[in-house]
Amino acid sequence: MTLRAHRTVPGLVQALAEANTRTLRGVFAAEGLDGLRPAHVLVLARLLGGGRRAVDLATDIGVSPQAVAQVAVTLERAGYVSRVSDPADARAKLLCLTDRGRYALRVTRAAGEQVEQRWSQALGEDDLDSLRRLLIAVLDLESGE
């Protein structure tokens, strides 16, 4: 894919996201993280603070509760999350990270740090810091902050 196909900044950001997805898929395969997809990290990362209900995760991520429920089944079968009773409501279940889920998040973070280190070597620390500030500004703009 050439840069010519992505002349707009949103197109370039999308191409970068696709490259990151390919990188993570390769890292997950190399680490034996079977069944894990980069999109699953959105759910796993939100469980770091403790167990969460699927409906709350859906609201945070901006998808339907059914979509989170489907992902939760996949992640539970693969051993990344477990379901436990919600102490505040015995009818409800909380999704909780397992040790395997925590490991997957450590692998994801390490992969991101390696990419960032490569970018720092190629761009220089000042340009990387500028890129970070600009991306944060654009994300804040898009999220209405």
Image: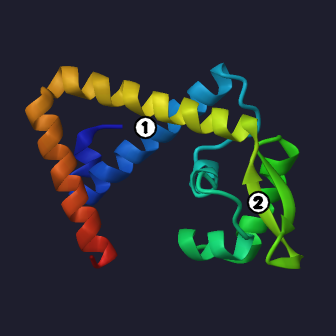
The residue wearing badge 1 is 19
Of residues 89 and 1, which is closer to you in this image? 89
111 on left or right of 74: left
Instruction: Look at label 1 and name its amino acid.
Output: Ala
Instruction: Look at label 2 and name its amino acid.
Output: Leu
Task: Identify the residue at horizontal 64%, vertical 20% (top origin).
Answer: 30
* Numbered disc in front, either 2 or 1: 2
Of residues 1 and 64, which is closer to you in this image? 64
Of residues 82 and 123, which is closer to you in this image? 82
Helix or strand or loop: what does disc 2 sit on? strand
Task: Identify the residue at horizontal 29%, vertical 22% (top origin).
Answer: 118
14 lies above or below 104: below
Could you say which disc has been placed on residue 62 in the image?
Answer: none
Quarter of the image with the N terminus is top left
Could you say which disc has been placed on residue 95 in the image?
Answer: 2
Where is residue 113, by image quadrant? Answer: top left
Q: Position of residue 140 (x, y in %)?
A: 26, 68
Helix or strand or loop: what does disc 1 sit on? helix
Q: Residue furthest right?
A: 91
Quarter of the image with the C terminus is bottom left
